[in-house]
Amino acid sequence: MSWTRAIMIPICQPLQAPHIESGSPSGSPCPQTHPERHEDELLDALRSGDEAAFTTLVDKHHASMIRIARLYVGSAAAAEEVAQEAWLAVLQALRRFEGRCTLKSWIFTIVANCAKSRGERDKRVVPLSSLVQEDEDGASVPPERFLGEGHPRWPGHWSQPPEAWTDDQLVSRETLQAIAGAMETLPPMQRAVMMMRDVEGLESEETCQVLGISEANQRVLLHRARSKVRSALERYLHEGEDPSWAPR
Amino acid sequence: MIVNPDDLSCKELVELVTDFFEDRLSPSVRARFEMHLSYCAWCRVYLAQMRETVQLAGRLSEETLPKGSKEELLRAFRDWKRERGGEP
Ligand SMILES: [Zn+2]
């Protein structure tokens, strides 16, 4: 399909953070990333057409790419298609990858761009970038759970404190489903940031690059997202509330 | 124990948890944050739950690949290799 050809391939601009290590042989200007040592070997193998190298990369990233694509497109099937298209774009652009960011964040940026184009083309979703301002003023915990500011001794301290979760609760399959359900109900940009940071394990700079947002914004969105998901888990674990209900 | 007006309240602390994890608090706020934690068991529970939330989210990456997609991708890889021909 021709639209893949139009996808912007990220060039991985050096990020603003100061360059600490100058002694690395690749001269990587991405100070936040810690490319695994074998990444260069993997790249060489890929470029020489080594199928095992490609399979390794697919095993490592394909599921993540589908999850990322799902942030922008309307269905699981469309997300799978986008991930497939993104791999073609990755292969086509491979020679231009300069190792200035990790291969992983480069690939994720490509899939995000593919998914954005697809989402806009299908007119199924509002582009994520227009939603950055969403819902930034909510409190992490409802104010009624704290004592009033006029309290003589403990103003702003817990009146309904959290109760610790047990190990049994934390390892249960149901809790995992609950957190997945809670993340689904987040506003799109918050969900995207929490997905990149906490599910895919990207660094904050990588997340900013993939999503095209500022570091400060990223941190606000991450905080909102984690706080809401914690609240949803709390309601689920203590009150048995279905986490896929819209958060309050 | 009397609360020093300089101390963070629990309500303030919960808004700073991510900045604390990301090491983005100024030294003075960080000191007040840690001071608060030293006497407030409830906020320690809250902090632990935020950490547990992050860890649980990390486990969502254990989901497996949809089947069938790999074969298709390998075909695409072979096509790419062929098209590229003998390029270095
Ligand atoms: Zn407290």
Image (cartoon, rainbow, N blue to C red):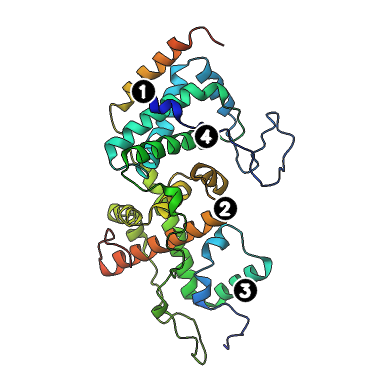
Disc 1: host chain: B
Q: Which residue is mark 4?
A: A106
For marks 3 and 2, give the one nearer the viewer: 2
Determine crowd level at label 4: few under 14, some 14-19, many 20+ residues with C-alpha closer than 10 A.
Answer: many
Label 3 – label 2 distance at C-alpha:
24 Å
Q: Are marks 3 and 1 in contact (CB under 8 Å)?
A: no
Tag 1: residue type?
Leu
Residue identified by numbered label 2? A215
Residue drawn at the location 57% of the way across and 62% of the way down: B20
| Residue A159 left/right relative to A246 | right
Amino acid type for the residue under numbered disc 4: Trp
Mark 1 closeness class: few <14, some 14–19, many ≥20 residues within 10 Å: some
Q: Residue at x 52, y 18 (%)?
A: A47
Viewer-side label of 3, 1 = 1
Instruction: Have a look at marks 1 and 4 and say if they share a chain.
Output: no
Q: Which residue is mark 3?
A: B32
Amino acid type, label 3: Arg
**Tally of numbered discs:** 4
User: Which element is circle 3 on?
Assistant: helix
Q: Secondary structure at mark 1?
A: helix
Q: Nearer the viewer, residue A201 or A195?
A: A195
Say which quadrant the N terminus of chain A sits in.
top left
**Going 52% across and 7% down the picture, which residue do you hit?**
B86
> In the shown orientation, is residue A201 left or right of residue B24?
left
Instruction: Answer yes or no: are tags 2 and 1 on the same subunit.
Output: no
Q: Which mark's residue is nearer the viewer, 2 or 1?
A: 2
SS type, badge 4: helix
Question: Which of marks 1 and 3 precedes in the sequence?
Answer: 3
Callout 3: 10 Å neighbours few (<14), some, many (20+)?
A: some
Tag 3 near tag 2, CB within 8 Å: no
Q: Which residue is mark 1?
A: B73
